[in-house]
Amino acid sequence: VMADSKHNLIKGNLFSRNDDEGILMEGGERNQIRRNRFVRNGAGITLGPGSRNVITHNRVSRGRDGIRIEKGHRNLVAHNVVAHTHRAGIRLGIHRPFFGGAHNVIRGNLVRGSRVDGFVVVKKDDHSLLKRNIARGAGDDGFDIASRTTKLTRNKARHNRDLGIEAVRGVIDGGGN
């Protein structure tokens, strides 16, 4: 657990078989989580709250969720590979308690084989951008977007069991999906 930590770099580690998260950051800002492996943890990476953190080039497999930004602003989640999670691959916001962040960027990630949805954005998350992500082989939807302020640009959804993109009215289509 990292609580209220700032300007840390976590790089090149293996987090395996932890009952809870591989990494849990609460209240941190401007931290970087780069090039780590997360295997069979309760969840891979959970951030909430936290702002201006960078989560890039990680590999997450076989946990409940891959990467969760429960509450936070202006975080970047980019170029990660998330595979075979029990629920969502990458999630913005949570339902219990019901909250989300704002202005987060989810870019260039691959989520494959999640049992439920590949990418999830809850209604309470505001003005986040999902760009150039790929959802492949999700058990439900590739992208399940409940926030009407979310922008989707150049994402791909392939071979998902239900819909490629399920989005509420008002979601912003940036084109190329």
Image (tube, rainbow, N blue to C red):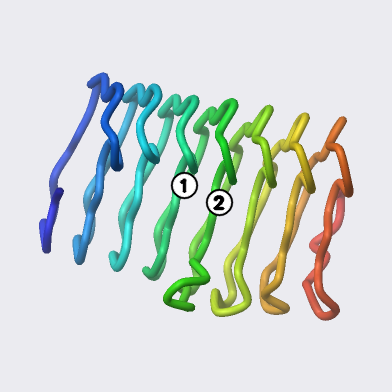
Front residue (pair 158, 102)? 158
Q: Percent x, y for residue 79?
A: 52, 33
**Left or right, residue 157 beside residue 10:** right
Whole-Å distance between the Cαs marked 1 and 2?
Answer: 5 Å
Residue sitting at 76 percent across and 38 percent down?
139
Identify the secondary structure beneath mark 2.
strand
Residue sitting at 26 percent across and 30 percent down?
18
Mark 2 — residue? 106
Residue sitting at 72 percent across and 64 percent down?
145
Mark 1 — residue? 77
Residue sitting at 49 percent across and 66 percent down?
94
Q: Percent x, y for residue 169?
A: 85, 79
Q: Earlier in the sequence, mark 1 or mark 2?
A: 1
Q: Are marks 1 and 2 in contact (CB under 8 Å)?
A: yes
Rendered image quadrant of residue 53: bottom left
Front residue (pair 38, 115)? 115
Check the image and report above or below for 75 versus 124: above
Check the image and report above or below for 155 versus 152: above
Q: Percent x, y for residue 112?
A: 67, 28
Front residue (pair 34, 3)? 3
Identify the secondary structure beneath mark 1.
strand
Front residue (pair 20, 145)? 20
